[in-house]
Image: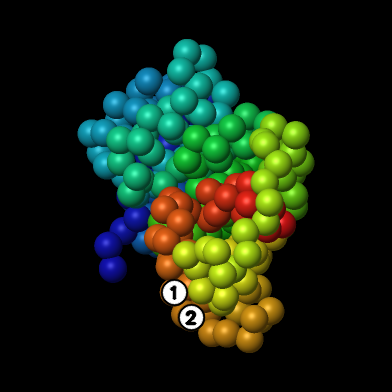
């Protein structure tokens, strides 16, 4: 199996070095580069074409949000995980809206960080129920009211519609499988079809879409 290639972006040398040491020793993960600011991150991502970027959100000059937006626009295959000091940081949510696949606290356990990298590299996003709720609170009042779309008026099948609603609630594939009495592989197939039919990049965009359509 090919290693997951990783680009580390943080303006704190000590923190960046620590992450490089820990993550570089993890099975199946290879740190291919580092950057100290947003401008350098965009340049290095274009040069190295990493599978995953760990992106500090607050940096001098070009911040992590705009850097994320540029990296994802240039190469959607590259997944970005936003790193933040504070839980439920509004800057982190800005990163999600810019195309990041999730966010983590900088002091998250190494095992959580490694699992997050593997998760987003596999095409999923990190959107926990609590984070989903906070996202909805942030978007509430900032978007026009929308009438819920009935399944029959949607390009989705009834089952795909149910999966979209579950994604909007922040459920993982495992949780969706248990709730809908499906196998995880079947759920993964449905999720892929939902994203393709609605032209959504990942679960983060699916959560936003579900809220916009009044499904959650």
> Do the CB atoms of the residues marked 2 and 1 lie less than 8 Å apart?
yes
Residue 73 seen in the current view:
yes
* Farthest-out residue, top: 61
Residue that appears at 56% across and 70% down: 152
- Residue 28 in percent (x, y) is at 37, 61
Other-residue count near label 1 (Cα within 10 Å), few / some / many at <14 / 14–19 / ≥20: few
Q: Nearer the viewer, residue 125 or 55?
A: 125
Q: Quadrant of residue 15?
A: top right
Q: Nearer the viewer, residue 125 or 106?
A: 125
Q: Quadrant of residue 32?
A: top left
Q: Is residue 91 left or right of residue 63?
A: right
Residue bearing mark 2:
186
The number of discs equals 2
- Residue 51 in percent (x, y) is at 34, 49
User: Could you tell me how far apart the alpha carbons at marks 2 and 1 are, in whole angstroms?
Assistant: 5 Å
Other-residue count near label 2 (Cα within 10 Å), few / some / many at <14 / 14–19 / ≥20: few
Q: On screen, 132 above or below 13?
A: below
Q: Secondary structure at mark 1?
A: helix
Residue that appears at 50% across and 28% down: 64
Residue bearing mark 1:
189
Q: Secondary structure at mark 2?
A: helix
Q: On screen, 189 above or below 131?
A: below
Q: Is residue 7 left or right of residue 103?
A: left
Quadrant of the rendering where the N terminus is positioned:
bottom left
Residue that appears at 31% across and 58% down: 3
* Farthest-out residue, left: 47
- Residue 36 in percent (x, y) is at 43, 23
The way the protein has been coloured in the rendering is rainbow
């Amino acid at each position: 199996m090919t290693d997951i290639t990783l680009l580390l972006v943080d303006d704190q040398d000590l923190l960046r070095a620590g992450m490089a040491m820990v993550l570089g020793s993890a099975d199946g993960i290879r740190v291919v580069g580092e950057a100290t600011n947003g401008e350098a991150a965009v340049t290095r991502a274009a040069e190295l074409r990493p599978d995953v970027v760990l992106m500090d959100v607050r940096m001098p000059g070009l911040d992590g949000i705009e850097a994320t937006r540029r990296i994802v626009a240039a190469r959607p295959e590259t997944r970005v995980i936003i790193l933040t000091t504070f839980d439920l940081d509004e800057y982190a949510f800005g990163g999600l809206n810019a195309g990041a696949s999730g966010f983590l606290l900088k002091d998250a356990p190494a095992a959580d960080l490694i699992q997050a990298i593997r998760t987003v590299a596999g095409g999923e996003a990190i959107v926990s129920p609590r984070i989903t709720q906070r996202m909805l609170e942030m978007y509430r009042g900032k978007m026009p009211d929308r009438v819920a779309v009935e399944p029959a008026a949607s390009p989705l099948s009834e089952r795909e519609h149910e999966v979209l609603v579950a994604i909007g609630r922040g459920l993982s594939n495992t949780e969706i499988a248990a709730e809908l009495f499906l196998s995880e592989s079947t759920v993964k197939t449905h999720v892929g079809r939902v994203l393709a039919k609605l032209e959504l990049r990942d679960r983060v965009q699916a959560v936003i879409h579900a809220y916009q359509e009044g499904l959650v």
